[in-house]
Image: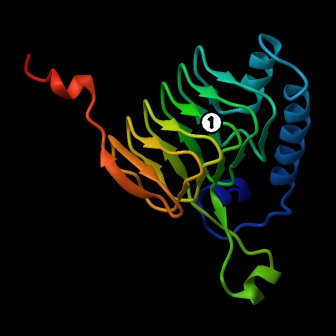
Amino acid sequence: MTELEKMQLGVEFDPDANEIQVLRHQTFTLIQQFNRTFAPKGRALAKKIFAKVGSQTIITPPFLCEFGKTISIGDRCFINMGVTMLDNAPITIGNNVLIGPSSQLYTASHPLDFKKRRQWECCNLPIVVEDDVWIGGNVVICQGVTIGARSVVAAGAVVTKDVAPDTLVAGVPAKMIKHIESEHDNNIGE
């Protein structure tokens, strides 16, 4: 198993491994280019940066990530300016997702034990954002979280636990405010 695969699986890995350093450097260079351009050239660069970028997806510069190839983005998504994705583990974004400005997705965390932090120990868990989610501006999504389909995360929320589908969450830490009923729900059986 490669050090990159270990990192993505959340097991102990060597952050100084050549393959990790090469990918980090390549992504840094591409991100710098991406942040100085816009569509259609920006789209071509995005396809080089990410594992997947769906059709009609717009990513507005500036955008920051560390590896890129661990991020998959579905169709018809809009990622607003200033978004940061710390992508040590996979980040999967579904279709029709809106992500507000200055939002941050963190797959990495560090131990509470300061001695382990001195060794730069890191634990990585994936983040999943399912279809039709709206993430407001300045939201933080922590490692290991899944945001359920059709949910809304209010601006400024810090999401530390999974969000059920069809819910509105807000606050620090984010808590469910209400169940969201869509027109689709009201038309079931018609």
For residue 163, side relative to residue 81 (left or right): left
162 above or below 149?
below
57 above or below 149?
above
Give the position of the C terminus as an image quadrant.
top left
Residue shown at the point (87%, 55%) measured from the top left = 18
Element assignment for label 1: loop
Give the position of the N terminus as an image quadrant.
bottom right
For residue 31, side relative to residue 129 (left or right): right
Q: Amino acid at mark 1?
A: Gly
Q: Position of residue 183 (x, y in %)?
A: 25, 23
Residue shown at the point (62%, 56%) measured from the top left = 107
Instruction: Write down the quadrant of residue 184 in the picture.
Output: top left
Q: Position of residue 152 (x, y in %)?
A: 44, 40
90 above or below 124?
above
Residue shown at the point (84%, 47%) measured from the top left = 24
* Residue at the spot of label 1: 100
